[in-house]
Image (cartoon, rainbow, N blue to C red):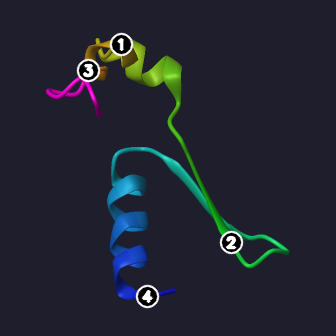
Amino acid sequence: MGPGVLIAKTLLQRTGAFVEFRNEKDGSTVVLALWPRAELEAAGYSPRDQIHAPDDATG
């Protein structure tokens, strides 16, 4: 793992996320980050609050 991946993993974990890295047979890497929804909702956070359309409609 490079330093960027380690930093990203640490920051995700500090937000309460479960983080898993997995190497696939084709050589690709899968990163899974899960947050405990019940805890986020109890804190008043709604996942829909963070959904934003791009400024440029073409992406």
Residue type at tag 1: Arg
Task: Give the distance between the C-alpha atoms of the residues marked 1 and 4, in whole angstroms.
Answer: 32 Å
- What label sits on residue 2 in the rendered view? 4
Residue 20: x percent and y percent? 63, 60
Work out whether mark 1 precedes mark 3 in sequence or the reverse, and give the earlier one.
1
Work out whether mark 4 precedes mark 2 in sequence or the reverse, and give the earlier one.
4
Residue type at tag 2: Ser
> SS of the residue at dot 2?
loop
Disc 2 target residue = 28
Quadrant of res 24: bottom right
Disc 1 target residue = 48
- What label sits on residue 53 in the rendered view? 3
How many labels, in total? 4
Work out whether mark 2 precedes mark 1 in sequence or the reverse, and give the earlier one.
2
Q: What is the span of residues highlighted in magenta in the rendered image?
A: 52-59
For residue 48, above or below residue 52: above
> SS of the residue at dot 1?
helix
Residue appearing at x 80%, y 74% in the figure: 26
Quadrant of the image containing the C terminus: top left
Neighbourhood count class around disc 3 (C-alpha, 10 Å): few under 14, some 14–19, many 20 upward: few
Predominant SS along the magenta part:
loop
